[in-house]
Image (spheres, coloured by chain):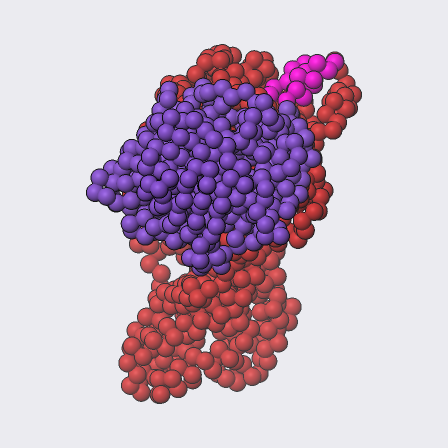
Chain colours: A purple, B red
Amino acid sequence: MKNKLACFVAVVFSLHPAAAQYRTALPGYHYEFPRDHFNHPEFQTEWWYYTGNLKSTDGHRFGFELTFFRQAVSRDPAKTSAWDVKDIYLAHLALSDLDGSKFYHAERTNRSGPGIAGVDETRGRIWNGNWQIIWRNEAQELQAIDEQFQLHLALRSEKPPVVHGEDGVSEKAAGAGHASHYISLTRIHTSGFVELGEKKFEVTGTSWMDHEFFTHQLTADQTGWDWLSLQLEDNTELMLFHIRRRDGSIDPYSAGTFVDAQGKTTHLRASDFVLMPLRKTWKSPSTGAVYPIAWKLAIPRLGLELEVKTPLESQELTGKAKLTPNYWEGAIILTGQRNGQAAAGVGYLEMTGYDHAVRLAR
Amino acid sequence: MSRLLLFYRLMARPLLREPVRAGLTVLAVALGVAVVLAIDLAGDAATGSFRSSMETLAGDNDLEIATSGGVPENLVGTLASLPYSIRISPRIEDFAVIAGTRKSLPLIGLDLVSEGSGSSRMDSGTAAETPFPKTLEEGFENSGGFDGIWVGASLGFKAGDRVPLLINDQVHDYVIRGAYPDSNGNESAIVMDIATAQQALTRYGRVDRILLKVQKTASLDEWQQRLRSALPAGVELRPQGTGTNENRRMLAAFRWNLRLLSYVSLVVGAFLIYNTISVSVVRRRAEIGIVRALGASRGVILSAFAGEAACFGIAGALIALPLGRFMATVAVKLMAATVESLYVSSRPGPIELGVGSVFLALGIGVGVAVASAYSPAREASLVSPVEAMGKGRREYDVRVQKGRVLWLASGLSLAAAAASRGNAIAGKPLFGYLAAILLVVASALATPAVVDALLTVSSKMLGKIFGVEALLASRSLAGSLRRTSVLVGALSTAIAMMTAVGIMVGSFRETVAVWMSDQLPADLYLRPAGSAAADRHPTISLGLAEKIAKLPGVMAVDRLRAYEISYENMPATLLSVDVDVLRSHHNSDFFSGRSKEEVLGELRDSNVVLVSEPFAYKHNVKRGNSITLALGGGRDSFRVADVYYDYSSERGNILMDRQTLLRYLPDAAPSNLAIYVSPESNLDAVRYEIEQTAAGQRVLLFSNRDLRGEAIRIFDRTFAITYALEAVAVLVAVMGIAGALLALVIDRRRELGLLHFLGAAKNQIRKLILVEAGLLGLLANTAGLMLGFALSLVLIFVINKQSFGWTIRFHWPVEILLAAITIVYVATVLAGLYPAQVAVQLNPIEVIHEE
């Protein structure tokens, strides 16, 4: 549900009437892996989204985020030069030093150009400069180089891919096509190292991957959203999102997915869960946005009650380009109970549209 | 205080009494200093602050990757994937002309998606120093995407304006999307997205440069080592702006020679100061005696005369400042034209008259004045009171020791001959300059003896031809031999320089003209209308050459392609020609003296090249050597089959077969076409057909004659500044003559008065002075021509060869020299008119009464 990037590019590129030439996400899509881990240029927007909670051998905790984002600009067959802008590739990278109470983030904008960014299925590569994922059979390597820090991680999914929504589509609004094809790897065993300044931390932990592709999934009266990925210690996972509407109400298309220990999924409708902000907020000094950084979650169907907190309040990504929206995306800690038993876990929380309404569509 | 009073009474008062003469001296100094200042200022503006146009918007990068013919663009992807945090900025660099104007602007293609997004590719942490924070938005907001252009704000365009741009041989309209600030350091340029630029230039697959910004965690050397391993052998990784430095180095010789030329006026000025102070010493001999008798020390006398000279220097320098500033504005235009047509595209910077310039002017003004006054001032200080008080020797007539001086002069000439054999030091013909200076000094030393001899011989002859006045004039000049010699020395130095440069330029021009008749054998030449210069080679659209070749009446078409490359840290031009076409028509001259068939046969489709003479000289390359060229990402070795004479560019050329070059750089678009028309066809008809074929493309078609005319026009333009410098030096000398004659008249009041008293008519007095002027001019011209001839040999065979590497064949530019010398001669005689008038108006009774 991370289409903060989608929204801005969608706005600027929707000026091109060519959107009609792209395919929309419709029910009945036949998924095929590893093929569907890679590029879908017939859809206008696509992203690959990695988040995770890591811990070093000496107990130092980190959170990370690496996003690859593709927005189609033109499918004009006359454009054949390497530099012709067919897609814009954006990427975001963040490292939350949870025990050092520091947040680092960076962004990139590129065209595919002569190998600058892109998705190459034959070589199993998804990249933007030297931020990259390389698939080697079932495993992935994640590498991201920044001036201040570097990530070198080996990822191995412990569960098969999850397809969210119903009949292969995750609906976001009323009407055919206002939906996405949404795939997740909900529990990825992660090991490797994090370099921060002069220091090198050997880390292990759990990551999460989202991969979505679609054309125009949201509508104008949807002003922002809250999204969570939760990995509980009982080897179950949850994905939930809330779409907030202009009038303050929660959109009925808000939804979620529960993944049990065996990897079996349960689709959750908006009526299946309650997601409430608590009083605790954090005001961004740079954007002035006030983010609710503690939440209460209840899913009666699953007998689950959780409280969501964060070890680091300041995890807001601010774009240097005026058009890039600002959003909070950070590592979270979960405590609560399931069917009377104590439950705990880690995850990621994303909140958009708190500084101003996100421009979603035309 | 008393010293000041003495200075005022002894020096200032007499000067104020003769404002014209004092004014002329000051003006001569002012002109000399102004020329030096102007050349210095203009040199700074035109070449010294040389910054390649292509450094516009290059930002704060550390390294650059470049190679001949462009860097393969895939390298950008390779670099972007390296595990280093570096910022990577690929660039396409060329020129565009705003159609309908002559305004040629740098055309720069940038990756605006990356650079314009505010989040440069590799520069995640710190603020990106991109001048285009808004291009991404502007590109999108105007819904046109990236096919628009951005321009410097000072060009005055608004977003949304349509501008027709002439690029290579095509004109297309571009929509302006925005403007960027171009006031501080950034030149006005046309900025496009890199994809648009590739399309506009039909140059795909390569970029001209990749700029890199690296982190400060390691030194630039370490970064170069790290990155080197990721790059193919044929690309060069070097500090950013290396190309600019190379160009700057190339321009250094040009500037250095020009600067030396500007000192000629100063040397002439020095002669005149020397003369003026000498005159003032002679005049005030009696006063000096009195002052000395009253107890003034030798030091006081010395400093008084040095002070007089310093006053001339300061006054001259103060006038020189505004004068030099003004002359610089003219000089900078001339210089910029030379630089552009001979060397490199550049735009002159602002002329800055700073504190440094003021000190330079005062320094050389006062320095030259005092230095040249030293000898007469010292002589004044040696005057003994008794001697000076005696009335016997009023004329200034120190015996010149002719014999010894002549020996010295011959010695110096021999030394000059020896010096001219010396090699260049650090690319500068220092021994050549030494030889020139030695020759000037030798000539100055020999002047008195020559003048004496000539005057002795001529006085009787002149008397017979021009009458008694001429006899008197001749005797009078011989009588004040030393002063006459100084005047002749000053004027002859100026004439010698003028002659020498005249012969050099004339020889050069003739050499080029002869060479062109060999090198331009085709009937028609075609080139794109786009911006061209020594370092710019716009291309002609593909296919035109083939279409023209198929026209009836066209016998053959030679497709010439040129690239700017860097060879061993110096700019050079890489050329390719259709060897088969060339072979059948050209008449090139080679060092080895071999026939063209033999030499060109070696070239065909093999790694064999020819190099031009300047190239061979600069890089010390000979026939049979191998040179290594980085081409299109690879490196390869090429055998030098021969060296050929070439005067088209000072940069140095490497010439190879078209097929050879295409193997390395597959861009087939030619830069120029040489078209051979079959002898039985009508040239005008064929020309018309070609024009029809090329309709829709902006190309220029020259006939052989037009092209030669154009080349000679450019040649003359590049030497315009040289001529201007010569003219100023001669002007200074002529002014000196006027001033000196005036002094002569005033000093000979008694004599002239007596002549008058004895019944000489006013006309006779006037004639006397004019003949003196004429004699001075004649002597100076004779001496000047001789010295000039010697200097021209040094200029042609030593200084030119070592600075630029050209072989110039000696040629007397008879008409030009005759014209110049006649003008100088007439000017010298005219300079006598005012002094003659003064002489005529002397009241004989008053003059005699003084006795």
Residue A175: x and y in percent read 66, 34
Quadrant assignment, res B757: bottom right
Count of numbered circles on the image:
0
Q: Toward the viewer: B664 or B27?
A: B664
Residue B167: x and y in percent read 64, 35
Residue pictured at 43% horizontal, 84% vertical = B9
Q: Is residue B539 magenta?
A: yes
Residue A245: x and y in percent read 60, 48
Residue B471 located left or right of residue B762: left
Which quadrant: the N terminus of chain B?
bottom left
Q: Toward the viewer: A274 or A38?
A: A274
Residue B587 located left or right of residue B378: right
Quadrant assignment, res B220: top left
Residue pictured at 42% horizontal, 39% vertical = A303
- Residue A44 seen from this side: no
Residue pictured at 74% horizontal, 13% vertical = B552
Q: Is residue A114 magenta?
A: no
Question: In the displayed structure, would residue B792 be above or below residue B74?
Answer: below
Question: In the displayed structure, would residue B705 be above or below residue B550?
Answer: below
Residue A133: x and y in percent read 40, 30
Residue at the outermost left position: A58
Residue pictured at 56% horizontal, 54% vertical = A356
- Residue A252 seen from this side: yes
Q: Toward the viewer: B606 or A270?
A: A270
Residue stretch in magenta? B536-559
Q: Toward the viewer: B393 or A99?
A: A99
